[in-house]
Amino acid sequence: QVQLVESGGGLVQAGGSLRLSCAASGRVYTIGAMGWYRQAPGKQREFVATITSSVTTNYADSVKGRFTISRDNVKSTVYLQMNSLKHEDTAVYYCHARRSVLVGPTYDYWGQGTQVTVSS
């Protein structure tokens, strides 16, 4: 099993920045891609960004050019640098990790979520 713990959320003014971190523990060697999703009140959870084990990144159109995802495999941690934050970025942000296909069937792990609130 893999456990994911997020940190770094909080309250920020529009135009500001925040950096989210997600530390993985447990069988971290089984992890392939890692990423971030978010869920705003009354809305479905949506994709934000992902980074593969080979450091290929992908972003939702709504955050391209503003958010940057990175990972430190030594620390088993993934980061989300969020700049130029907008009110519509307000949501609970969830860390996600997917088990590598090299070690078994697809399986998704989720963190408990961290609140990001952007005041307008």
Image (cartoon, grey):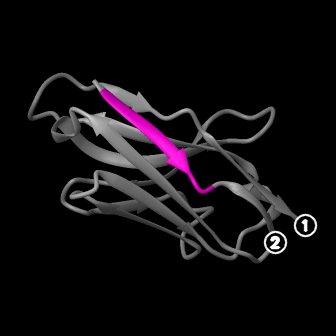
Q: Position of residue 12 (x, y in %)?
A: 78, 66
Q: Position of residue 35 (x, y in %)?
A: 42, 49
Label placed on residue 14: 2
Q: Earlier in the sequence, mark 2 or mark 1?
A: 2
To which quarter of the image does residue 30 belong? top left
State which quarter of the image contains the C terminus. bottom right
State which quarter of the image contains the N terminus. top left
Q: Secondary structure at mark 1?
A: loop
Q: Is residue 14 above or below residue 108?
A: below
Residue type for callout 2: Ala
From where the camera sits, is residue 47 visible?
no
Q: Nearer the viewer, residue 92 or 6?
A: 6
Q: CA distance from mark 2 to mark 1?
A: 5 Å
How dense is the environment of label 2, judged by Cα within 10 Å: few (below 14), some, or many (20 and up)?
some
Q: Position of residue 54 (x, y in %)?
A: 18, 59
- Residue plotted at (67% across, 73% down): 17
Label placed on residue 120: 1
Q: Is residue 86 above or below residue 16?
A: above
- Residue plotted at (28% across, 51% down): 76
Residue type for callout 1: Ser
- Residue plotted at (40% across, 60% down): 58
Q: Is residue 108 left or right of residue 27?
A: right
Q: Nearer the viewer, residue 58 or 21?
A: 21
Q: Do the residues bearing badges 2 and 1 touch, measured as CB atoms within 8 Å?
A: yes
Q: Position of residue 111 (x, y in %)?
A: 49, 35
Q: Which residues are magenta?
A: 2-8
Q: Is residue 24 left or right of residue 113?
A: left
- Residue plotted at (74% across, 41% down): 40
